Amino acid sequence: MIELVQQIFNGLAIGAVYTLIGIGLTIVFGILGIAHFAHGVVAMSGGYVAFILIEKFGIPFFPAVFLSMLAGAVFGILIERIAYRPAQNAPPINAFIIALGLTMMLDGLNLLTFGPDQIVVRTPYTHVYNFLGIVVTELRIVVLSCTAVLLLLMWLFVTRTKTGRAIRAVAQNRGAATLMGVNANAVAYVVFGLSSALGVAGGALVGAMLALAPGLGESLVIKGFAVLILGGLGSIPGAILGGLILGVSESLAAGYISSSYKDVIAFAVMIIVLLFRPEGLMGKK
């Protein structure tokens, strides 16, 4: 029983990161209808930015993550304006090709800048606690707390601000929202900025818990889309639930079967959900 609780706790921590990645994908797809496949490499690049701010400039962990999120938001806006906006009326395959190109370009840039070796984002949260035989690391508590705070802030922004109401209006009916005076292009900026900021936070937390390396972005976006499909396309509560379920499932598979099967779980989840419940756990039919 202790081993089971231990694996569930570990899974919740990594699932929190998957939730941040998955929500970033969810709001872009649910509001703008864009399958942003470059989201994973954007998140990973944000983790590298946090690493530079900590190692080169001596900025503490939380301010470094915050500055990385700001940089990620700006970068997300540029991606929307320069890459996706010109293809907004083109067939969906065009957006996929654009995302593929962005992924290859950013992966190559990270490889040239940081090399092929793994790097770890240093944090001061190194304490380890033991509760009734369950090992609880301070860093995992920080990751869960950060995720909870970011989700709460996002919920308040979307539900309690004028911009949030505009985002929800565009998500429900873009044409009607435009007729009512909502600037859909400005909403697209905000959505991509918010999505990228959340993704960058996830990338920095992954770098702190595990490590960063070129190619990690592809793995992150696969986990993000698994969360998107499991929770339901466009459902933010579904993305939260899906991220936690995926994280716990991976942790249990690694603990009771083999760590080599851990990354297979995301593909298995996507296949099973698409076969038996294609709308996801909390999505609409």
Image (cartoon, grey):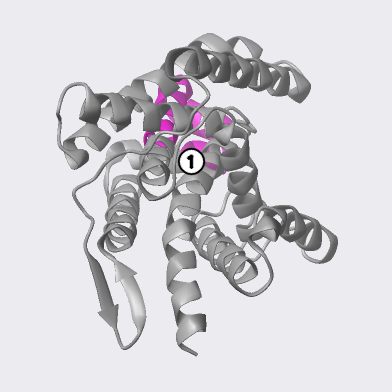
Q: Nearer the viewer, residue 11 or 117?
A: 117
Q: Nearer the viewer, residue 128 or 52?
A: 128
The picture places residue 20, in percent across and down from the top left corner, at 44, 48
Give left or right: position of 62 versus 173. left
Residue with the most extreme front position: 117
The picture places residue 232, in percent across and down from the top left corner, at 64, 56
The residue that label 1 is drawn on is 24
Q: Which residues are magenta?
A: 169-197
Say above or below: 110 vs 163.
above
Give left or right: position of 172 versus 233. left
Is the residue marked by circle 1 packed among few (<14), some (14-19), or many (20+) residues within 10 Å?
many
Residue with the most extreme right position: 275
Say if the magenta span includes residue 220. no
The picture places residue 175, in percent across and down from the top left corner, at 57, 30
Say if the magenta span includes residue 178. yes
Give left or right: position of 138 versus 84. left
Residue 251 occupies quadrant:
bottom right
